Image (spheres, rainbow, N blue to C red):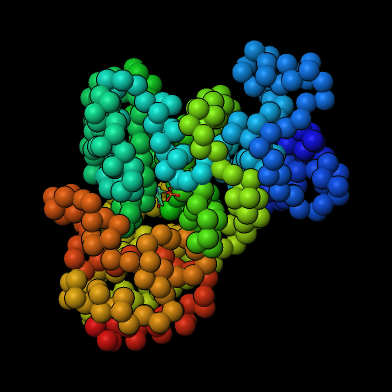
Amino acid sequence: MSDIAKSKVDPRHPDHRPHTAVLTRGFDPSLSVGSARPAVFRSSTYVFSTPEAAEHAFATATGKIAVPEGQRPDLIYSRISHPNAEILEDQIVPLEAGARAAAVFNSGMAAIMTAFFTFGRLDGTIVYTTPLYGGTTGLIHQFLGPLHMKGIAVASGDTAGLDAAIAAAPNCCMVYLETPANPTLTMTDIERASAAAARHPDRPMVIVDNTFLGPAFQHPLNLGAHLVLYSATKYLAGFSDMLAGIALANDPEIIQTLRNRRVMFGNILQPDECWMLDSRLPTVGLRMNRQSKNAQRLAEALHGHAKLHRVIYPTLFEDGEQIRIFKKQCDFPGGVFSLDFKGGKPAAFDFLRNLKIARNAVSLGGVESLVCHPKTTTHSGMTVQELAESGVTDGLVRVSAGTEDWRDLLADFEQALAAC
Ligand SMILES: *Cc1c(COP(=O)(O)O)cnc(C)c1O
C-alpha cells in the first residue's frame, strides 16, 4: 500500500509541461486497483508487513535513515503523512514554476503559522509588506510580538523603503511579502526584495503569499523567493467549498523541515480534502485564465463610470513603478479588482444590496463572483491610520470575478451602479 504514495517524477515522461505533468506524475493506477483517478485512503494508521518494516519506517520518518530524493518515508500514521497528501503534494509541484517539493496544510493560516514557527527566531525580526492578509497581521502582532519576534512593516509599493528596511533589520530571519496587496492590488518587486535579502548577512528566508496570482500568473521561486505559501481555499480549490493551505519550495529540505513541524502541530490536510483539492488542480489554469479575462473586461468597461472615483486593476495602473512591477512580474492581471465609489459607504452598500449575480461574501477565487466591502469586513481590524495608509477607503468594494459570462456580470454591475 505504501507504494501508492511514493513520490517520483514520472519516469515514463520526465519532460512533461505543467498541464500534462499535473495529470501524469505522482499517481500510478496499477497501485490503486486500476482506478483512473486516486482513491481516498481515510485510514489513520498503516499496517507493517514485519516488525523490521516498522523499525525501518520509523528510522526513515525520523531521519535516521536518509530517503533518496524523490522518494518518501514509509507510511506510519496519518498525522505524519498519508497517501492522499503525498499524491496531492506530488501533483501540485509542476504547477508552481521552480518548485521541487510541497507540503499541504489544513488551511492557508495553518501553512503561514507553520512557516513562521519554523523559520522565525527568538529576538529575530520579520520585514513584511502592508497590508497583509488580516489573519497574518494578527499572527505577527498578537502572537509573535509577545514572543520577541519583531515585525517591521513597509508599505507595499515602497520599493526603496523595502530595500532600506531589509538592509537595516537586525537579526533578520524573514522577509514576508504579499503581492498584489489586498484589496488595493499594490505590487511589490519580489526579485528586488529577494536580492536585498541575499545581501543581508543573516540571509533571511524570503516568503511570498502567492494566493492572489499564483500558481498561474506569478512565479516567486523563479524570482529568488525561498518559499511560496497559498491559501488553497481560494483559486486552487476554486469552488468556495473547502479550506486548505500549501507551501512550495525549490529546496526539498525547506519542505521537509516544515513537514516535521506539521507532525508536531497536527495540521496536515485530511485525506478527503486532499482528494478534493487534487481533483481541482488540472483546471486551476483554465479557471484562473477565464477569471482574469472576466475581471479585465469588467474593470476596463467600468473604468471612468460617473459614480466611481476609480477602478483599481493592474491594466489600469497609473503609477510608473507599479506598471513596471506588473509588467515584469505577472503573466496576467488576475481575477480581483476594486471599485472606489464617489458616494462612499452608502453608495458601496447600495451597490452590494442591488447585485443579483455576484454575491456579498468575503473570500475570493471561486467560480462564482463574490463582492465585499473591505473596510467594514475583511479589513475592519485595521487602525484608522493603517486604513488610510493602505488606501482602504469608505467607498471601496472588492470584486472577485468568477467564471460566469462577463456580459451578464457587466449588466448586473451596471444595473446595481444605476441604483446607487
Ligand atoms: C484567505 C487568505 C489567507 C488565509 O487562508 P485560509 O485558507 O482562510 O486560512 C491568507 N492569505 C491570503 C492572501 C488570503 O486571501
Residue 86 appears anywhere in the view: no
Q: Position of residue 141 (x, y in %)?
A: 25, 37
Q: Position of residue 219 (x, y in %)?
A: 50, 44
Residue plotted at (23% across, 56% down)? 380
Q: Position of residue 408 (x, y in %)?
A: 47, 83
Q: Nearer the viewer, residue 169 or 258?
A: 258
Q: Nearer the viewer, residue 285 or 114?
A: 114
Vertical arrangement, residue 174 with respect to residue 328, above or below: above
Vertical arrangement, residue 77 with respect to residue 108, above or below: above
Q: Position of residue 251 (x, y in %)?
A: 55, 27
Q: Nearer the viewer, residue 319 or 417?
A: 417
Vertical arrangement, residue 231 with respect to residue 144, above or below: below
Q: Nearer the viewer, residue 168 or 6?
A: 6
Q: Is residue 379 left or right of residue 115?
A: left
Q: Residue furthest left?
A: 385
On-image quarter of the C terminus: bottom left
Residue plotted at (61% across, 18% down)? 62
On-image quarter of the N terminus: top right
Q: Is residue 376 left or right of residue 65?
A: left
Residue plotted at (43% across, 53% down)? 212
